[in-house]
Image (tube, rainbow, N blue to C red):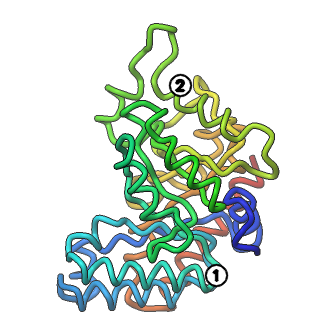
Amino acid sequence: MSPFEPFGTRLRQAMDERGPLCVGIDPHASLLSAWGLNDDVAGLERFTRTVVEALAGTVAVFKPQSAFFERFGSRGIAVLEKAVEEVRAAGALVVMDAKRGDIGSTMTAYAETFLRKDSPLFSDALTVSPYLGYGSLKPAVDLARENGAGLFVLALTSNPEGAEVQHAVRADGRTVAATVLGHLAAENAGQTPLGSFGAVVGATLGDLSSYDLGINGPLLAPGIGAQGATPADLPGVFGAAVRNVVPNVSRGVLRHGPDVTGLRDSAERFADEIRAAVEAA
């Protein structure tokens, strides 16, 4: 898999070869404790190293949550940098869950942090927030294109508070979420086998048939496992776009650690269940 191919191409290949699963790397304090680790940099490092060593050779995509590393300052960021490097070296893709969103030179700096090839935190894709206006994301869109990376833009999130913004109706009669999805469809127009600009759409939201999810790009779907959604729910939520879903599981896999076999078995089981649900749709 060439690192210079567009993210959408590399993502499609990774999911076809390794299975359609994204594992979150979310070192909550409670999860560190459940693993018998201290809530400190040493615990963070042990947790992260175990997840990477257990799964990076077989799972298609990893989604580290930047906040859980940032809270330890520069030493936590160093752990994150090493994890990103090792995951990508093992042939998996990294979606950095940092949900950045700003304007002008500040958005450019955020983009350079995660989407510039020579950055120590260079990731295959980055989660971003469009709620300063979709156009504010242009520096990230441009840099992603330049470096063969991608974006996942918050569109229909699973948190209940999101509805007050995402379901708001604009003067033209479209909801804010539908407008975001429309912008992403335009970014991905004509791209094969998959565009590089995706949306974050919660797997717990139920029937979304009123929204056009056919953006020719990936749909990052948190909510499977501990949040209540199951692989079998995916066709009902995503309809005809289900093959482009990147289902994210975090605690559902991570709770089986620190046992390496438990982590691997859980990830394999989720990947198999998701593949079966997608193929049956």
Under circle 1, the secondary element is loop
Residue type at the position of mark 2: Thr
Q: Residue at x 72, y 50 (%)?
A: 243
Q: Which mark is residue 205?
A: none
Q: Nearest to the eye among marks 1 and 2: give it.
A: 2
Count all numbered tags in the image, as a single digit. Answer: 2
- Give the residue at the far front of this rendering: 105
Q: Residue at x 52, y 55 (%)?
A: 230
Which residue is labeled 2 in the image? 179
Residue 277: where, in percent of width, then height?
68, 55
Q: Residue at x 72, y 68 (%)?
A: 4
179 to 106, vertically: above or below: above
Neighbour tally class for label 1: few under 14, some 14-19, many 20 plus, Cα within 10 Å: some
Q: Write down the quadrant of residue 132 in the picture.
A: top left
Which residue is labeled 1 in the image? 58
Q: Write down the quadrant of residue 31 in the picture.
A: bottom left
The answer to whether residue 76 is left or right of residue 192 is left
